[in-house]
């Protein structure tokens, strides 16, 4: 019995479980979170092991542009900030996700990188840096086809 950690979940980060049993949730929080160190885990407070009340938190990585990155989308290479060598983002089973928005990230390894890179709280300036220069924005500068008259 218990909640099983998916076999393809990253080994680099501490898995975190959650329980939403009102008896376990600390005041002011929406869920009780706890570190998980083995498969078939259950809530350390109430012993619950039935989803969706108890489960494994989705781990959201930070996706960053990286010329050496192995995740390629529309000709642009990216990598996970915490694991450059990884060639995939999320699978149907690993309960992981990836985002280009630093605010959405909860992976400890990626957060450390984001912090090192000074990317938090830079809002849209940072996001725009993710977008290739020359992205559709420039099409707005089309020259008018009007003929000159004198
Ligand atoms: Zn619980
Ligand atoms: Zn990560």
Image: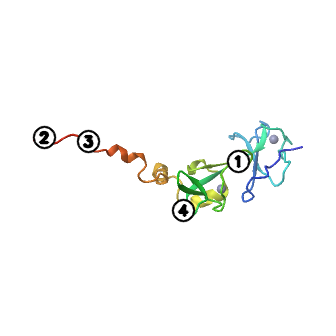
Residue to which mark 3 is pinned: 144
CA separation, marks 4 and 3? Answer: 37 Å
10 Å neighbourhood of mark 1: few (<14), some, or many (≥20)? Answer: few
Secondary structure under badge 2?
loop
For residue 91, the mark is 1
CA separation, marks 2 and 4? Answer: 49 Å
Do the CB atoms of the residues marked 4 and 3 lie less than 8 Å apart?
Answer: no
Q: Looking at the image, what colour scheme do you see?
A: rainbow
Q: Is residue 59 visible?
A: no
Secondary structure under badge 1?
loop
Q: What is the residue that sits farthest to the right in this orientation?
A: 1
Secondary structure under badge 4?
loop
Do the CB atoms of the residues marked 1 and 3 lie less than 8 Å apart?
Answer: no
* Left or right side of 45 for 114: left
User: Residue 81 lies in what quarter of the image?
Assistant: bottom right
CA separation, marks 1 and 3? Answer: 47 Å
For residue 149, the mark is 2
Q: Earlier in the sequence, mark 2 or mark 4?
A: 4
Q: Nearer the viewer, residue 53 or 59?
A: 59
Q: Nearer the viewer, residue 70 or 32?
A: 70
Residue to which mark 4 is pinned: 67
- In the rendering, at what x and y percent does residue 1 appear? 90, 43
Q: Earlier in the sequence, mark 1 or mark 3?
A: 1
CA separation, marks 3 and 2? Answer: 14 Å
Secondary structure under badge 3?
loop
Q: Earlier in the sequence, mark 4 or mark 3?
A: 4
CA separation, marks 4 and 1? Answer: 23 Å
Do the CB atoms of the residues marked 2 and 1 lie less than 8 Å apart?
Answer: no
User: Residue 13 lies in what quarter of the image?
Assistant: bottom right
Dividing the image into four quarters, tell me where ligand 2 lies: bottom right
- In the rendering, at what x and y percent does residue 117 appear? 54, 61
């Amino acid at each position: 019995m218990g909640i099983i950690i998916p076999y393809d979940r990253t080994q680099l980060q501490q898995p975190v479980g959650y329980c939403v049993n009102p008896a376990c949730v600390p005041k002011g929080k929406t869920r009780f979170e706890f570190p998980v160190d083995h498969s078939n885990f259950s809530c350390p407070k109430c012993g619950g092991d039935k989803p969706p009340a108890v489960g494994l938190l989705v781990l959201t990585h930070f996706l960053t542009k990286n010329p050496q990155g192995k995740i390629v989308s529309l000709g642009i290479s990216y990598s996970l900030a915490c694991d450059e060598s990884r060639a995939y983002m999320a699978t149907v089973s690993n309960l992981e996700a990836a985002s280009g928005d630093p605010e959405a990230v909860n992976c400890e390894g990626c957060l450390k990188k984001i912090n090192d890179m000074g990317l938090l709280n830079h809002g849209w300036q940072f996001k725009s840096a993710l977008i290739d220069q020359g992205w559709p924005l420039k099409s707005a500068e089309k020259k008018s086809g009007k003929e000159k008259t004198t």
